[in-house]
Image (cartoon, rainbow, N blue to C red):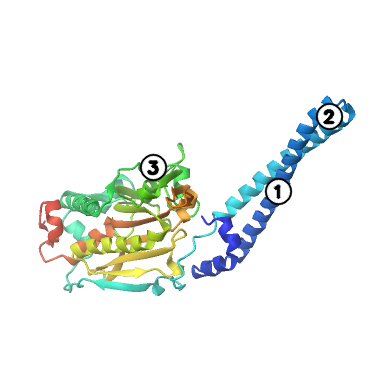
Amino acid sequence: MLSIKYIQENKKEVMARLQIKNFEAEAIIKEAIATDNNRRATQQKLDTCQSELNSLSKEIGNLFKSGKVQEANSAKQKTTELKEEIKNLTQELSEYEKQLHNILIRIPNLPNPWINSGKGAEDNVLIRSGGNIPCLDDKSLPHWELAKKYDIIDFELGTKITGSGFPVYKGQGAKLERGLINFFLDEAIKAGYKEVIPPLMVNEDSAFGTGQLPDKDEQMYFVGSDNFYLIPTSEVPVTNIYRDTILNASELPVKNTSYTPCFRREAGSYGKDVRGLNRIHQFDKVEIVRIELPENSYSALEEMVVHVENLVKKLELPYRIMRLCGADMSFTSAMTYDFEVFSAAEKKWLEVSSVSNFESFQANRLKLRYRDENDKKIKLAHTLNGSALALPRIVAALLENNQTADCIIIPAALRSQTGFDKIIC
């Protein structure tokens, strides 16, 4: 969440940078500033009344002691009026504060000034690519047909048990999924990330803190009886470990990794582009989360990008790294890199990771701060997170790209985790 102080002091810059996200900001920025001005004016009136009341309260005692009863009673009447005015002003101030909060939570994070605007995914910037796209013969199969052929993922059984978008992993498919999870966690731990296992449900405060609420309310599964949300990513519970926390600068960076199932409603998703594992409602993901000093957050972002790049390299997958344009960025992000791997049978690029710097946007919502060791002031930290990696499309690409006539080859880096070097019927 942007601070009203920053908006007040940098109105033109805020509107210009929000335009990069194709967000028409003029009306809401004017509304925020006008509401804040009203809030300030009300606060000033309240402070004046409170000061006058305090002075009168002291004066009344002195008047009584001096025998000036009539003047004392007149002053008492004035205090009664002031108390009523203070009550009304306090209520008015509370209303302005609520209004301002509800306005601010509707304003997206400012994109980094380096970001180009664009109109959509077609305007994302290619940073680099790697790996070799395999040449498959005409008999090659998409992953959903390979899953059926080798009996490793059952989409129909998942539909029977729950509904569409909840696959069942079986046999070597289940071992491959578990092997990938362990591989990603082990690599993150080697890179200095501390593993945590968080809850799979969060409360409303947690969902608000990382920006899922109110922006992505319709994409989250809600447990109405308890007012909990199933997590769409472990970014939510892991980052919220540090909600309402003041860290010492010496404790930063904080680096956490976590494996969890993730749950997304993906309302409105249908058609050939979401077949098989391309877009499902429950999926496994290993996440990396960092809390950084502001001056270090962009070097940390690049470090995270290199970490994810090394993962796809070790899996021997053709990949490309895209820096998202403003129009394709999320509500909360200041800069995002997407990783895509090539699906040889489907002949298209599949997104498998987003690595983002949120700067202080989440931290302001979370009240996640640190104590500067130089000036001892309390300041907002920067938060970052990335998929390292999301499994469904990684599995899809591994199955399709490594298929032969009679088996699917497992990349060498995974074999110690899976216990086998190929999937066979």
**Residue 229 image-quadrant placement:** top left
Three-letter code for the amino acid on which mark 3 is drawn:
Met
In this orientation, which residue lies closer to the viewer: 192 or 180? 192
Quadrant of residue 407 within the rendered picture: bottom left
The residue singled out by tag 2 in the image is 63
Q: Is residue 367 visible?
A: yes
Looking at the image, residue 76 lies above or below residue 329: above
Question: In this image, 148 relative to 421: left or right?
Answer: right
Location of residue 179 with respect to 399 vertically, above or below: above
* Total labels drawn: 3
- Vertical arrangement, residue 122 with respect to residue 309, above or below: below
Label disc, if present, on residue 201 of the rendered structure: 3
What is the spatial separation of the Cα atoms under label 3 and label 2, in whole angstroms?
62 Å
Give SS at disc 1. helix
Q: Position of residue 83 (x, y in %)?
A: 75, 36
Looking at this rendering, what residue extends furthest in the front direction?
66
In whole angstroms, how far apart are the C-alphas of marks 3 and 1? 42 Å
Q: Earlier in the sequence, mark 3 or mark 1?
A: 1
- The crowd level at tag 3 (other Cα within 10 Å; few <14, some 14-19, many 20+) is many
Contact (Cβ within 8 Å) of mark 1 with mark 2: no
The reply to whether residue 211 is visible in this rendering is no
Q: Which secondary structure, mark 2? A: helix
The residue to which callout 1 is attached is 44
Q: Secondary structure at mark 3?
A: strand
Q: Earlier in the sequence, mark 1 or mark 2?
A: 1
* N-term mark: 3 or 2: 2
Instruction: Mark 2: give few (<14), some (14-19) or many (20+) Cα within 10 Å.
Output: some
Mark toward the viewer: 1 or 2 = 2
Residue 192 rendering spot, x and y as whole percentages: 26, 52
Instruction: Residue at 54% x, 70% y: name it.
Output: 16
- Select label 3 or label 1 by which is in front: 1
